[in-house]
């Protein structure tokens, strides 16, 4: 009998003869550092972003520890400011943005479209080196004493008042931006040029759609960030007046430019997660995704309207009231395609045959948390409510529900789902399910109280707070401890499985994607013969 | 321990009504989604005997339904929230104006009669108040959770927000925009007093001349009057300038408000009045925010 948790395998069952596939192409450090194989580059990315994830996580842990009491006792104001800055900079640019596109997109897009590699393999490797270079600058800034501007670098604080290592960090972020741009370019060209025969646009898996749309945003938005940071550098270094009114500049101009990038950046982080959910849910519900076309259009709706809502970060900034109204209206519009996606995932479960394997637990958790994060986003899009809620813990809770409850959950879900393909080994299922539940529970305990804190008026970026808010803060800090355990678990058992995990069959989940039709792990050039596609994705059957 | 915030202003009452309505609306949606998800997960778990015949790959009416229904609800909420938001910025002559400057890391307030306070703000119950904000250095944000109001103080310009305190008591005043090392300690309290008690409080500590009188003094000291009052220099008469329609030499027309007066003094070359030579010197760097606002208050009251 098949275990009740894992769908029966259809597809290729036995491990491929030339196991371990691409992993066996060379065992030296050099073979990794000069590889052009998109799968190996994905792994290089995975290692790098995992390191940064734990750096950013350590900073968050320190912050939650400090916030366990209303007074400042563990760290000084200055240290706290540096902690939240580094947490934000590292998590946004060195973890979340590259997480799904650069690791899983890199690994999977060529496999899913039946290609041998990315369109520009050398450029792909170069992106990784650029990422590492950006990382070195940022780590250097940390070692040199840190930076205290917040990840938002608001002027004129960042250009004239902060005496921390602003230039170094800005350089780091500037550089890492180019790695995003190049990865985006690579994915766009790969999707256009290298699809297998028969693989039309509307036969593409939604994961590919999502990464394609994300890549377009990376290409269009990241240059604006690079430009903005350059201007900050010029003003800080040479005193050229752009943002500082004392030099004839305008501080709101900075906010417009910054959010013109940083709002779409939210979708850079969450669209790929939506793509992952759209792979995992049909597979473990054994049903085709509900409303495939609507799902694909929704991705593009989000990606394009997402460029027009940046001013919703500035409702109390002194921007004109009428501009505020336009941005508010557009922010409600961008919520509609997101709502469509939630309803479609839910409808996908209808008449399915549902297996609760670890990836599915992550995906179901994702839908729940994303729903809460999205609905609370409506509060912030509502002008009058945002006046009270902006710059409080309500905002922190809202975007962590999207970024952590959404993107990180789905990154982990994806890692488990494709782990057999990536490593050629199975992860320990029971432990993985325990970790998924721990993370879900810890996450809610950490961040739900923060909604209440924000509604009660606790401003963000505070290391001290009114004493009557301590109980809720304690809940949140306790949740952070649970969450930390939840995140460490996969680190250990996935590492363990690399050596002692059961050898994976080609298609352990009976999934339909092209990536499951080749060996686990795939050979260097992915497929023994070029696959030919004759039908749409998600041809699952709940009754079989 | 509190679970819900105190509401101490007219804006707070309006914001709360909207907030709790949103909690109900979004709560119903979330609950609907979660109940369905859980029901499907239980009913259609692998191995259950549920009927799985002909699962629909899509349903047009369903898709359209769950696109258009949220659209309608969203437009409703948007309008409601925008109407309440507009109240924060309504201009009316009934409001008492208080000038507040942010400075790393304190709030300095100055009442019209010249009474000053730091990290505290006394307000009379039931009196509409307009806070005019400015900053000496970086961006700060004036935040009183009990009033549900927040407004950034932005270098180089004035911003303002309006509300009416409706409940006596002491409430937290915070800085909500990150402004450097002691950001978390920048703040204090707002004290709402009965009108008579407030009037007494206002008289008690006011050793200073009123804002307008300070402004008049500066107007003479800085030599403004040398050009602008009965002078041989061709300069506009400033009596009643506030609220006047101004024609500029580049063809633009605008109404003189606080922001315009501020720019006229600090950046006179930016808006040159039609029919005059741009000979007025800039006073940038010679005035702090308090003096500048005193000067403007004098111009406003000099009718
Ligand atoms: Cu945004
Ligand atoms: Cu501040």
Image (cartoon, helix red, strand yellow):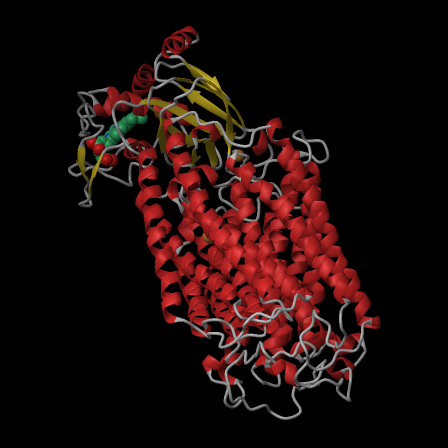
Residue sitting at x 36%, y 32%: B160
Closer to the camera in the image, A261 or A374: A374
Residue sitting at x 46%, y 52%: B29
Residue sitting at x 31%, y 14%: B213
Q: Where is residue A110 shown, x and y percent of the image?
A: 59, 80
For the C terminus of chain A, the quadrant is bottom right
Closer to the camera in the image, A237 or A528: A528
Image check: B106 left or right of A142? Answer: left
Q: Is residue A330 above or below residue A430?
A: above
Q: Is residue A86 above or below residue B57?
A: above
Q: Where is residue A173 shown, x and y percent of the image?
A: 58, 57
In the rendered image, is residue A335 in sight? yes
Closer to the camera in the image, B162 or A294: A294
Image check: A191 left or right of A311? Answer: right
The residue most toward the bottom is A529
Q: Where is residue A6 shown, x and y percent of the image?
A: 69, 72
Closer to the camera in the image, A210 or B295: A210
Q: How many marks?
A: 0
For the N terminus of chain A, the quadrant is bottom right
Q: Where is residue B255 shown, x and y percent of the image?
A: 21, 35
The residue most toward the right is A500
In the rendered image, is residue A407 in sight? no
């Amino acid at each position: 009998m098949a275990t009740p948790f894992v769908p029966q395998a259809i597809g290729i069952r036995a491990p491929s003869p030339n196991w371990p596939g691409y992993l066996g192409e060379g065992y030296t450090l050099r073979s990794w550092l000069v590889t052009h194989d998109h799968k190996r580059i994905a792994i290089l990315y995975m290692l790098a972003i995992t390191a940064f994830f734990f750096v950013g996580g350590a900073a968050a842990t320190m912050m939650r520890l400090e916030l366990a009491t209303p007074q400042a006792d563990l760290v000084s104001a200055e240290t706290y400011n540096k902690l939240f800055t580094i947490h934000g900079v590292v998590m946004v640019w060195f973890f979340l943005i590259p997480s799904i596109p650069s690791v899983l997109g890199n690994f999977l897009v060529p496999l899913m479209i039946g290609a041998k590699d990315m369109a520009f393999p050398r450029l792909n490797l170069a992106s990784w080196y650029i990422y590492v270079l950006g990382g070195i600058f940022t780590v250097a800034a940390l070692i040199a004493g840190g930076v205290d501007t917040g990840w938002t670098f608001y002027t004129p604080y960042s250009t004239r008042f902060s005496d921390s290592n602003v230039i170094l960090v800005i350089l780091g972020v500037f550089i890492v931006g180019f790695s995003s741009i190049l990865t985006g370019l690579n994915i766009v060209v790969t999707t256009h040029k290298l699809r297998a025969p028969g693989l039309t646009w509307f036969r593409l898996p939604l994961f590919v759609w999502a990464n394609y749309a994300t890549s377009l945003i990376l290409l269009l938005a990241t240059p604006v960030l690079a430009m903005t940071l350059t201007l900050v550098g010029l003003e800080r270094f040479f005193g050229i007046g752009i943002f500082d009114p004392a030099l004839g500049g305008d501080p709101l101009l900075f906010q417009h430019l910054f959010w013109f990038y940083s709002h779409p950046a939210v979708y850079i982080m969450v669209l790929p997660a939506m793509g992952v959910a759209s792979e995992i849910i049909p597979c473990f519900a054994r049903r085709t995704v509900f409303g495939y076309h609507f799902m694909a259009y929704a991705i593009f709706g989000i990606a394009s309207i997402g460029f027009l809502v940046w001013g919703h970060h500035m409702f109390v900034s002194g921007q004109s009231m009428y501009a505020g109204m336009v941005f508010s209206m557009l922010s409600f519009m961008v919520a509609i395609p997101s709502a469509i996606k939630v309803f479609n995932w839910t409808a996908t479960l209808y008449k399915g045959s549902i297996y609760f394997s670890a990836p599915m637990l992550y995906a179901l958790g994702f839908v729940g948390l994303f729903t809460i994060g999205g609905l609370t986003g409506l509060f912030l899009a509502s002008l009058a409510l945002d006046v009270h809620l902006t710059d409080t813990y309500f905002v922190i809770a809202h975007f962590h529900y999207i970024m952590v409850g959404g993107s990180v959950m789905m990154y982990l879900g994806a890692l488990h789902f494709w782990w057999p393909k990536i490593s050629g080994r199975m992860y320990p299922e029971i432990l993985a399910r325990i970790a998924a539940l721990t993370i879900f529970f810890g996450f809610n305990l950490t961040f739900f109280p923060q909604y209440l804190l924000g509604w009660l008026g606790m401003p963000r970026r505070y290391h001290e707070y009114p004493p009557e808010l301590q109980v809720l803060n304690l809940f949140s800090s306790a949740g952070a401890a649970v969450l930390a355990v939840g995140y460490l678990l996969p680190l250990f058992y996935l590492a363990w499985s690399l050596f002692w995990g059961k050898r994976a069959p080609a298609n352990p989940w009976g999934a339909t994607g092209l990536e499951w039709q080749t060996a686990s792990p795939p050979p260097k050039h992915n497929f023994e013969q070029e696959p030919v596609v004759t039908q749409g994705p998600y041809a699952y059957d709940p009754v079989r | 321990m509190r679970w819900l915030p105190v509401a101490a202003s007219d804006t707070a009452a309006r914001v709360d009504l909207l907030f709790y309505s949103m909690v109900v609306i979004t709560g119903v949606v979330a609950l609907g989604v979660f109940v369905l998800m859980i029901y499907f997960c239980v009913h259609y778990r692998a191995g259950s005997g549920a009927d799985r015949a002909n699962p629909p790959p899509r349903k047009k009416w369903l898709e359209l339904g769950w696109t258009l229904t949220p659209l309608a609800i969203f437009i409703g909420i948007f309008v409601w929230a925008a109407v309440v938001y507009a109240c924060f910025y309504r201009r009316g002559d009934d409001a008492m104006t208080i000038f507040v400057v942010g400075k790393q890391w304190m709030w300095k307030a100055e009442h019209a009669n010249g009474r000053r306070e730091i990290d505290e703000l006394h307000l009379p119950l039931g009196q509409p108040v307009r806070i005019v904000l400015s900053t000496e250095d970086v961006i700060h944000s004036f935040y009183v959770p009990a009033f549900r109001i927040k407004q950034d103080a932005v270098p180089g310009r004035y911003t303002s927000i309006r509300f009416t305190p409706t409940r006596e008591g002491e409430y937290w005043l915070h800085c909500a925009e990150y402004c450097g090392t002691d950001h978390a300690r920048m703040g204090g309290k707002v004290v709402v007093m009965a009108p008579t008690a407030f009037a007494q409080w206002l008289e008690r500590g006011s050793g200073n001349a009123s804002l307008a009188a300070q402004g008049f003094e500066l107007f003479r000291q800085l030599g403004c009057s040398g050009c602008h009052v009965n002078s041989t220099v061709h300069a506009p008469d400033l009596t009643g300038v506030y609220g006047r329609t101004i024609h500029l030499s580049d063809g633009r027309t605008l109404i003189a408000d606080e922001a315009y007066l501020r720019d006229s003094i600090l950046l006179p070359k930016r808006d040159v009045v039609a029919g005059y030579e741009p000979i007025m010197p800039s006073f940038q760097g010679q005035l702090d925010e308090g003096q500048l606002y005193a000067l403007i208050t004098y111009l406003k009251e000099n009718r």
